[in-house]
Amino acid sequence: MTTLPIIALLYDFDRTLSPKDMQEDSFIPSIAMPSAQFWHESNGMAEAHHMDKVLAYMYLMLKKSKEKGRSIRREAFQEYGRSVELFPGVPQWFDRINEYGACQGYQIHHYIISSGLMEIIEGTEIARFFKAIFASAYYYDETGAAQWPALAVNYTSKTQYLFRINKGILDVNRDEEVNTHMPDSIRPVTFPRMIYLGDGFTDVPCMKLVRENGGHSIAVYQGQTNESIAALMKDDRVDCVFPADYRTGSALDQYVHHVIDKITANDRIQKIYLEQKEAISAIKL
């Protein structure tokens, strides 16, 4: 049986698929703390102690949970994910895009690359649609309690996961293989078949890398366009910007369909070129 080629849709999570930071829907309310105060304390701690901001929020989540008597087991963090709000159309988006890709002769694989917490994402209603979730996560001890960051994903380290997807090395423990040479012809997901969706400057390294290697980068926003979104377009960091509306017929929905059409056309053109080149090479001149 012939395996269909893969088109990869890569998503940030907070403010890309969800209107807020994922902690704000249920975790922060559970510790009876205003969201602004939590982030002020987290960012202040990062600045005062020269910490990575991701490590700071992960530390503060554990500290506040213990102070308030909240569970720090994986299941508790996953439960917070069940309350995460999503943008309009997100729950129906994946099946619809998968179906459209299949009609064009492709498998559509969806991936998360996020600085948010993996366990919360795992608890959302859309977790089942992702081939892999690359996000920050805790190490849990033998009692099942979170003790230490197992993985912290910040905006610069996000780019490594593009190469993992490109080479099909999804296990984060397989570090050496990411930098090992692999011919482009056997990489399961080529960059021109990648579509990256993000919401702002923390996504710039991924957006730029995907775009420079022939893929497509899209910025989404809520409300009105702002200076940061306009700058992404002005500085050629992204191909287009759209409201974060994933419903059927939205501008974003139509554009992603167009990108899939473009990938299809480019692959057909390349196939004709290679067939003709091979035929001509066989002719003795």
Image: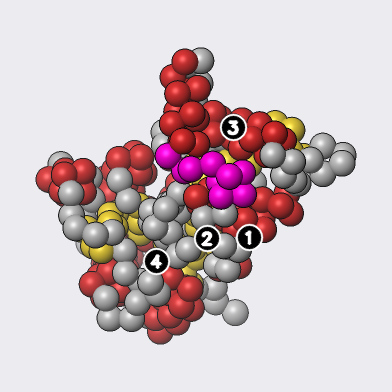
State the separation of the CA atoms marked 1 and 2.
9 Å
Identify which residue is drawn at 43% across, 70% down.
Answer: 90
Which residue is tagged 3?
60
Which of the two residues, 91 or 164, is positioned nearer the viewer here? 91
Q: Dot 2 lies on which element?
A: loop
Residue lying farthest front? 32
Bounds of the magenta segment: 27-36
- Specify the label residue 87 is tagged with: 4
State the separation of the CA atoms marked 4 and 2.
10 Å
Residue lying farthest top? 49
State the separation of the CA atoms marked 4 and 1.
16 Å
Query: Which of the two discs, 3 and 1, labels the residue nearer the N terminus?
Result: 3
Which residue is tagged 1?
123
Residue 132, given in percent of the width and then of the height, sits at 58, 56
Q: Quadrant of the N terminus?
A: bottom right
Query: Is 93 situated left or right of 174 in this image?
Result: left
Which residue is tagged 2?
84
